[in-house]
Image (cartoon, rainbow, N blue to C red):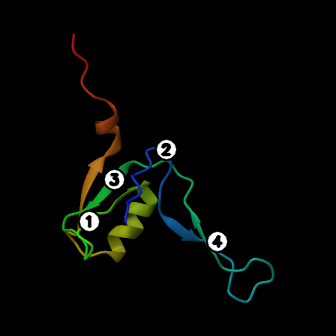
């Protein structure tokens, strides 16, 4: 299985579209967050398939993630620090 790399331009969290299961039309679906990410979360330990997953998250989605996942489950990397390497003079 090939992992999808973190997206540095758009948060990769999926959120409900706020339509209930009994609404007419397309109904309940998960949609991707449209906010700009600020962190990359990476699993500390590989999953059963031996791979370590990672994804980009905005501040709001990171707060939701932190409430749902156990402490110390992932490592956080600040995207801004990664994008701005030190310039040599």
Q: Nearer the viewer, mark 1 or mark 2?
A: 1
| Element under disc 3 | strand
Q: Is residue 41 left or right of residue 12?
A: left
The residue at 21%/10% (across/down) is 89
For discs 4 and 2, the disc positioned in front in the rendered view? 2
> Local crowd at mark 3 within 10 Å, few (<14), some, or many (≥20)?
many
Which x, y percent locates residue 2?
A: 38, 60
Residue at the disc numbered 2: 9
Among numbered discs 4 and 2, the one appearing first in the sequence: 2
Q: Which residue is mark 4?
A: 17
Mark with earlier residue (1, 3): 3
Could you say whether the residue bearing mark 1 is in a helix, strand or loop?
A: loop
Q: CA distance from mark 1 to mark 3?
A: 16 Å
Circle number at residue 51: 1
**Drawn side of residue 4 relative to residue 20, left or right:** left
The relative height of residue 30 versus residue 85 in the rendered view (above or below) is below
Q: Residues under labels 1 and 4: Cα distance?
A: 30 Å
Which element carries disc 4, helix, strand or loop?
loop
Q: Residue furthest front?
A: 1
> Is 51 placed left or right of 15 in the picture?
left
Q: Which residue is mark 3?
A: 40
Q: Which mark sits nearer the N-terminus, 2 or 3?
A: 2
Q: Residue at x 22, y 72 (%)?
A: 71
Q: Earlier in the sequence, mark 3 or mark 4?
A: 4
> Which of marks 2 and 1 precedes in the sequence?
2
In this view, which residue lies farthest toward the bottom?
22
Q: CA distance from mark 3 to mark 4?
A: 23 Å
User: Spatial distance from mark 2 to mark 3, Cα to Cα?
Assistant: 12 Å
- Calculate the distance from the C-alpha at mark 4 to the C-alpha at mark 2: 21 Å
């Amino acid at each position: 299985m090939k992992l999808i790399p973190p997206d540095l331009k758009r948060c990769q969290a999926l959120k409900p579209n706020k339509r209930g299961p009994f609404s007419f039309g397309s109904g309940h679906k998960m949609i991707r967050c449209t906010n700009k990410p600020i962190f990359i979360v990476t699993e500390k330990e590989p999953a059963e398939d031996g791979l370590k997953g990672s994804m980009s998250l905005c501040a709001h989605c990171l707060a939701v993630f932190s409430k749902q996942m156990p402490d110390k489950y992932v490592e956080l990397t600040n995207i801004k620090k990664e994008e701005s390497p030190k310039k040599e003079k």
